[in-house]
Amino acid sequence: MRAPLPGPLDRLTAPVYNVRGKVVLVTGAGQGIGRELVSILYRRGATIVAVDIDEAAAQRAAAELGSRAHGIGADVTDRGRMEKAIAEITERFGRLDIVVANAGVTPVPATLRTMEPGDFDRVLDINLTGVFNTVHPALDHIVRTGGHVVVVSSCAAFAPGMGGSPYMISKAAVEQLGRALRVELAASGATAGIAYFGLVETPMTHAMLDADDLGRRINELLPWPLSVRITAAQAARTIADGIARRAPRTIAPSGWQPYALLRGVINTVLDSRLAADSSVHDIVRAIERRR
């Protein structure tokens, strides 16, 4: 017999949102932050649905967790497939309580003038439209259970984007999606939050900043503490703890919090300085020579 669903008052007054017994969908769960997150939430008692474009990775993640985990191969850019995935989850488990839209990619380094339009489309399709495709078919279920949605944005949403603007654009848009969603869900007692991360030690970060000469030069522009990195496990724990609080936003590493709060002032000054910085000019020229 399933536990009764919470009423609106219960949802709004509960001090802790316990994931034990909840059904949780996480995209991009085959590696990195997503893989660490499903592990944390499973240990906290959740039933996990690990979704990844790499079906073998999703099923491997589920198998390594245990009997309360299920793996699904799905491309978040495929709207029809994501609708079917949500239907499969609710048919199998009878409910869906939490959705974490985590899947994302970084672009090939390029300026707006020199980038291939297809590269721009790919990043927006995965990072933004993929979030919508994940969240939209799940919302009726989230409202019914008084659940919680997390959309993974980035501190890149409020940082300068030269050389990688599609990523920054997509993450700024995801931030706005998350803000709208939280307000829209409030009347039902369901909630939504936005996760922002700076530099996280993942294969995506290493490919973009460490294995590439220009990436290393861009990385050197970040001052301390913005250059501080966290592990994928630390990032995942931030999301998991945020779910427990139904947090409207989580930011890690903590050095990005003042920037987030003061971005309107900081970015006005920073954009002017970067536009006048000869070392930035050199990096932009080098990026364009590659194309």
Image (tube, helix red, strand yellow):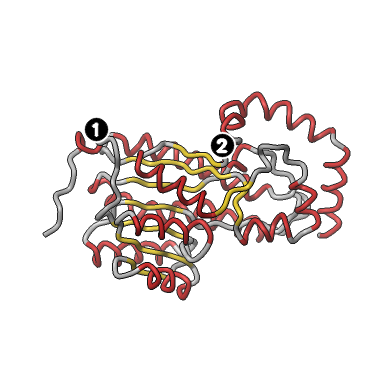
Camera-side residue of 39 and 182: 39
Q: Which residue is mark 2?
A: 254
Nearest-to-viewer mark from 1 and 2: 2
Instruction: Name the quadrant containing residue 59.
Output: bottom left
Q: Amino acid at mark 2?
A: Ser
Residue occupying the point 67% across, 27% down = 266
Q: Residues within 10 Å of mark 2 (few under 14, many from 20)?
A: some
Label ID, residue 149: none
Spatial separation of the CA atoms under disc 1 and disc 2? 28 Å
Q: Is residue 256 left or right of residue 111?
A: left
Q: Amino acid at mark 1?
A: Thr
Residue occupying the point 25% across, 67% down = 92
The extreme bottom residue here reads: 56
Q: Is residue 96 left or right of residue 71?
A: left
- Height in image: 163 above or below 263? below
The extreme left residue here reads: 1
**Residue 91: x and y, percent?**
24, 65
**Residue 233: x and y, percent?**
50, 54
SS at mark 2 in the image: loop
- Height in image: 268 above or below 243? above
Disc with the residue nearer the chain's start (1 vs 2):
1
**Residue 77: x and y, percent?**
49, 61
**Residue 174: x and y, percent?**
51, 45
SS at mark 1 in the image: helix
Instruction: Name the quadrant containing residue 160.
Output: top right
Q: Which residue is mark 1?
A: 13
Residue occupying the point 53% across, 45% down = 153
